[in-house]
């Protein structure tokens, strides 16, 4: 029993954590159009960072750089704040959220 707990703790400790980057991109969301030198803010998987990520998306929409249909805004917000942030990409035109693993 003690071995199982220790193994589970080691697995949890070494499991990759997620970080997210919002990218401005072309309509097809090609990786070539996602410029890490332009979009370089990394959002960790925390409540506060997810709020900042959503604020960044809202800012890009208000500035007209990214399109988000009004009927999809709630679903995109829910994905970023409470679900899987990369799922919000399906609602964005000229914007995408990418996930990166780090240890």
Image: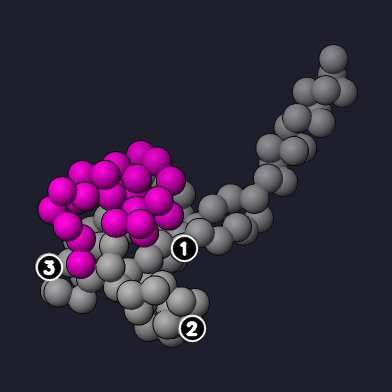
What residue do we see at 41% from left, 72% from top?
29
Q: Position of residue 95 (x, y in %)?
A: 32, 69
Quick check: 9 above or below 23? above
Q: Is residue 26 visible?
A: yes
Quick check: 78 above or below 31? above
Q: Does residue 25 appear left or right of residue 10 in this picture? A: left
Q: Does residue 77 appear left or right of residue 3 in this picture? A: left
**Where is mark 3, residue-wise?**
62
Q: Position of residue 34 (x, y in %)?
A: 43, 78
Task: Please name whichever residue, 76 or 56, is drawn nearer the observer in this view of the structure.
Answer: 76
**Where is mark 1, residue-wise?**
98
Helix, strand or loop at label 1? It is strand
Tell me the magenta residue range: 67-91
Helix, strand or loop at label 2? It is helix
Calculate the distance from the C-alpha at mark 2 to the C-alpha at mark 1.
Answer: 13 Å
Q: Quadrant of residue 96?
A: bottom left
What residue do we see at 46% from left, 76% from top?
30
**Eye-nearest disc, 3 or 2:** 2
Task: Please name whichever residue, 58 or 25, is drawn nearer the observer in this view of the structure.
Answer: 25
Q: Position of residue 73 (x, y in %)?
A: 20, 50
Q: Is residue 41 visible?
A: no
Q: Earlier in the sequence, mark 3 or mark 2?
A: 2
Q: Is residue 89 a member of the stretch shown in magenta?
A: yes
Residue 32, disc: 2
Q: Does residue 31 appear left or right of residue 77 in this picture? A: right
Most common SS among magenta residues: helix
Helix, strand or loop at label 3? It is helix
């Amino acid at each position: 029993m003690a071995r199982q707990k220790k193994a589970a703790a080691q697995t949890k400790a070494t499991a990759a954590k997620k970080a997210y980057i919002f990218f401005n991109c072309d309509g097809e969301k090609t990786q070539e159009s996602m410029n890490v030198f332009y979009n370089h803010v990394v959002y960790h998987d925390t409540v506060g960072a997810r709020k900042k990520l959503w604020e960044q998306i809202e800012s890009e929409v208000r500035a007209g750089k990214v399109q988000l249909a009004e009927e999809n805004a709630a679903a995109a917000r829910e994905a970023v704040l409470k679900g899987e942030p990369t799922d919000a990409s399906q609602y964005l035109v000229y914007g995408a959220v990418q996930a990166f693993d780090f240890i």
